[in-house]
């Protein structure tokens, strides 16, 4: 069985890394230069870090669920194919 997915180009991978680090740097600079007390800046920084972590976790979970469904569908397709082959045999 072959996978129908194509790998991402190196330009796309570089773009996604640059976008992530650019957004992280702008968020950090915005928090750093806000006219707030240090504890408020720390709270906002922790919230931003937790948001990134939860986005990564959610993305991985959704991808794993999708991959699992694809595997189940492939297994069921193989079972159906086998059943059809058994039914189509002469003398069966």
Image: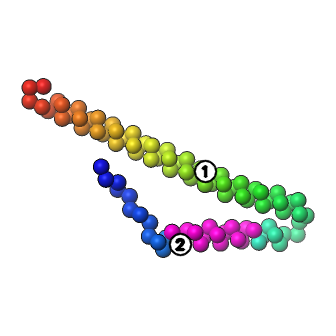
Residue 80 rendering spot, x and y as whole percentages: 27, 35
Q: Is residue 57 above or below residue 91?
A: below
Residue visible at 70% across and 71% down in the picture: 25
Q: How packed is label 1: few (under 14 Cα within 10 Å), some, or many (20 or more)?
A: few
Label 2 to label 1: alpha-carbon separation? 21 Å
Say if the magenta span includes residue 24. Answer: yes
Which residue has dot 2 on it? 14
Residue 9 rendering spot, x and y as whole percentages: 44, 70
Q: How packed is label 2: few (under 14 Cα within 10 Å), some, or many (20 or more)?
A: few
Residue 41 rendering spot, x and y as whole percentages: 84, 63
Q: Is residue 65 above or below residue 13?
A: above
Q: Is residue 73 left or right of 31 when viewed as pictured?
A: left
- Picture quarter containing residue 78? top left
Q: Is residue 13 above or below residue 63?
A: below
Q: Is residue 15 left or right of 7 when viewed as pictured?
A: right
Residue 12 rendering spot, x and y as whole percentages: 49, 70
């Amino acid at each position: 069985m072959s996978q129908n997915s194509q790998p991402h180009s190196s330009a796309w991978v570089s773009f996604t890394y640059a976008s992530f680090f650019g957004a992280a740097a702008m968020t950090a600079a915005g928090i750093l230069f806000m006219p707030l007390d240090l504890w408020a800046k720390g709270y906002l920084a922790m919230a931003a870090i937790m948001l990134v972590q939860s986005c990564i976790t959610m993305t991985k979970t959704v991808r794993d669920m999708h991959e699992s469904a694809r595997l189940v569908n492939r297994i069921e397709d193989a079972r159906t194919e086998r059943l059809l082959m058994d039914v189509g045999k002469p003398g069966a």
